[in-house]
């Protein structure tokens, strides 16, 4: 249904020009334009994390400073409380790179770092490329769903995250724990295994979210959405399985979803493996005996030649897109247009 042939040339050039850090900043800036004002005076963690790419030489100085200035001007990095301090232009290039790195690893405070940036902007050391802004705003609008009339929702794989946690189901599979088939449900939805990046990207683009728990408690919740996007929802309850496979318009964005059956005990906040992934019989693969199981595709993590194929209620991606969703605009556009 979708592939990489149409528009391949255009987007191959785009991928060369736009590095991961820049796109992450754009995602945040795009969200900021829909918010009344920036309320949090701390700088987003993902900006700090990706400063390391620049410090290690994986993106150019021009790309980094252009993005930082843009972030400040759009109040993703707040400057209203910053003090300038005693800086000179002669100190800027190397010291700014060093202080950025020290800030990213927590040795320099947000306030000190913002003061440095504010000085650079005030003295016009960082020059902003407005063609860059125009181009990236256009690209982000082409893949976001903020203004869509169709309602889309992404299912957060809380139960799968729990299964992969320490002393989870995989401790049992490895023979390390005989009592690890019933485990506590994790609460932190943004530290998920294997699809946390995809979740953050899609949330940044305006997609609604529900969790496994939401669907298990109320399987009809998906009926209010025109499009359902499944991430790495490997471990699901029977009610969630029925709700997803019964919806008429589903994108199975990650292979290996709907692979094993679990039950949930809400009194003690636990999830228990019932069937699948070689349990209770080593010959059992898919816990629902689902004929559309596509787990064989999960080992293609590069997704260089990705494509979707159709099933009875939607489409499935034939590779594992976790490392690609933060920069492949063609894939993001395909997700939007489905």
Image: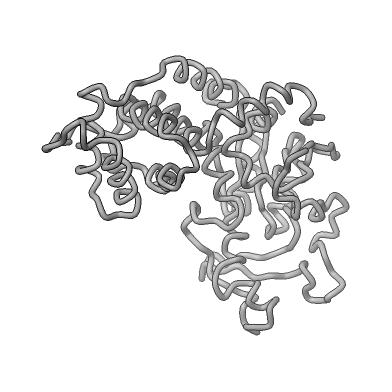
Residue 95, by quadrant, is: top left
288 relative to 324 in the view: left or right: right
Q: From the top left corner, tell me how far across and down residue 276 is, in percent.
A: 77, 67
Residue closest to the eye, 301 or 98: 98
Q: Is residue 152 above or below residue 218?
A: above
Q: From the top left corner, tell me how far across and down residue 150 is, in percent.
A: 63, 24
Tell how many labels. 0
Q: From the top left corner, tell me how far across and down residue 133 is, in percent.
A: 44, 19
Which color scheme does this rendered protein use?
A: one colour
Residue 76, by quadrant, is: top left
The residue lying at 57 percent from left, 56 percent from top is 158
117 relative to 308 in the view: left or right: left
Q: Is residue 71 above or below residue 154?
A: above
Residue 96, by quadrant, is: top left
Residue closest to the eye, 302 or 162: 302
The N terminus - image quarter: top right
The C terminus - image quarter: top right
Q: From the top left corner, tell me how far across and down residue 310 is, in percent.
A: 84, 37
295 relative to 106 in the view: left or right: right
The residue lying at 83 percent from left, 37 percent from top is 309
The residue lying at 79 percent from left, 63 percent from top is 287
Q: Is residue 287 above or below residue 298?
A: below
Residue closest to the eye, 207 or 77: 77
Most extreme residue toward the left is 86
């Amino acid at each position: 249904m979708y592939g990489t042939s149409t528009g391949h040339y255009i987007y191959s050039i785009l991928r060369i020009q736009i590095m991961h850090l820049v796109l992450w900043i754009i995602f945040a800036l795009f969200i900021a334009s829909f918010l009344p004002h920036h309320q949090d005076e701390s700088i987003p963690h993902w900006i700090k994390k990706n400063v390391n790419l620049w410090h290690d030489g994986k993106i150019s100085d021009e790309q980094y400073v252009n993005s930082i200035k843009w972030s400040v001007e759009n109040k993703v990095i707040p400057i209203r409380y910053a003090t300038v301090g005693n800086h000179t232009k002669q100190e800027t290039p190397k010291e700014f790179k060093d202080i950025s790195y020290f800030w990213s690893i927590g040795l320099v405070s947000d306030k000190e770092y913002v003061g440095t940036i504010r000085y650079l902007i005030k003295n016009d050391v960082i020059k902003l490329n407005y063609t860059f802004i125009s181009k990236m705003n256009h690209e982000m609008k082409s893949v976001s769903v903020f203004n869509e009339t169709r309602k889309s929702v992404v299912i957060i794989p809380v139960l799968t995250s729990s299964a992969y946690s320490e002393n989870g189901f995989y401790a049992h599979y490895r023979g390390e724990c005989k009592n690890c088939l019933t485990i506590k449900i994790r609460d932190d939805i943004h530290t998920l295994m294997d699809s946390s990046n995809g979740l953050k990207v899609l949330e940044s683009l305006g997609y609604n979210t529900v969790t496994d728990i939401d669907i298990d408690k109320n399987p009809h919740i998906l009926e209010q959405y025109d499009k359902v996007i499944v991430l790495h929802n490997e471990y699901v309850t029977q009610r969630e399985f029925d709700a997803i496979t019964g919806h008429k318009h589903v994108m199975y964005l990650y292979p290996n979803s709907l692979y094993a059956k679990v039950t949930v005990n809400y009194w003690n906040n636990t999830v228990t493996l019932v069937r699948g992934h070689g349990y209770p019989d080593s010959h059992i693969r898919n816990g629902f005996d689902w004929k559309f199981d596509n787990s064989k595709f999960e080992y293609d993590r590069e997704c260089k030649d990705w494509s979707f194929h159709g099933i009875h209620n939607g489409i499935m991606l034939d590779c594992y897109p976790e490392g690609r969703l933060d920069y492949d605009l063609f894939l993001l556009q395909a997700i939007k247009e489905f």
